[in-house]
Image (cartoon, grey):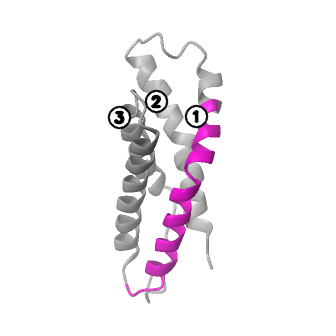
Amino acid sequence: MNLGYPIKHWLTTLVISPAIMIVGDTIANSKLMTDAMGIYFLFVLFGLIFSIPALLVYVIIFESIARTNRSALMVKTILNLTGAFAVLVTFLIIDGSMAKTPSIVYTVGLLIGSLFYKVKTDKPNE
């Protein structure tokens, strides 16, 4: 079981997404982020906790499709769609009044995070 890609992708998403949200809020000149570092660590901590079920689903799907004869691009596409769906479901369950913005930001973070790592599949010549 090779969990390198899913774990790195998950952790990168959890680290990048709050930073994107803070930068976006700073650009919008909002007063929400008065303590950016505290909010950043809070988002990372709660992200770690609330995303564990999504990670488990992601790993199961990764393990099942990484062994198939699909290209690395196809595997990443399937995993990104799965991750985006998991983000949306997680924020629908939390159902806060501001859940729309974080779900978009975490999906963007997920997509950006997927660009950093290569998926190793069992397909020949990859």
Magenta segment's dominant SS is helix
Which corner quadrant holds the C terminus?
A: bottom left
- Residue 89, given in percent of the width and then of the height, sits at 40, 50
Q: Which residue is mark 1?
A: 43
Between disc 1 and disc 2, the foreground one is 1
Nearer the N terminus, badge 1 or badge 2?
2
Count residues near mark 1 (Cα–Cα under 10 Å), then give few for <14, some for 14-19, many for 20+.
Answer: some
Q: Amino acid at mark 1?
A: Phe
Q: Earlier in the sequence, mark 1 or mark 3?
A: 1
Instruction: Report the amino acid beneath label 3.
Output: Lys
The residue that label 2 is drawn on is 21
Are the residues flagged by discs 3 and 2 in contact, CB closer than 8 Å?
Answer: no
Quarter of the figure with the N terminus: bottom right
Residue 15 falls left or right of residue 104: right
Tell me the crowding category of disc 2: few under 14, some 14 to 19, or many 20 or more residues within 10 angstroms, Cα based: many
Residue plotted at (46% across, 39% down):
94
The residues bearing labels 3 and 2 have C-alpha atoms spaced at a distance of 12 Å
Q: Secondary structure at mark 2?
A: helix
- Whichever of labels 3 and 2 marks the residue nearer the N terminus, that label is 2
Q: Which secondary structure, mark 1? A: helix
Q: Is 81 above or below relative to 20?
A: below
Location of residue 86 in the rendering, given as x and y in whole percent from the top left corner: 42, 55
Magenta stretch holds residue 106:
no
* 3D distance between C-alphas at marks 1 and 3: 15 Å
Q: Residue at x 64, y 24 (%)?
A: 37
Q: Which residues are magenta?
A: 42-69
**Res. 123 image quadrant:** bottom left
Magenta residue check for 68: yes
Q: Is residue 17 above or below residue 32?
A: below
Q: Which residue type carries mark 2?
A: Met
Q: Which residue is mark 3?
A: 100
Q: Position of residue 2 (x, y in %)?
A: 61, 76
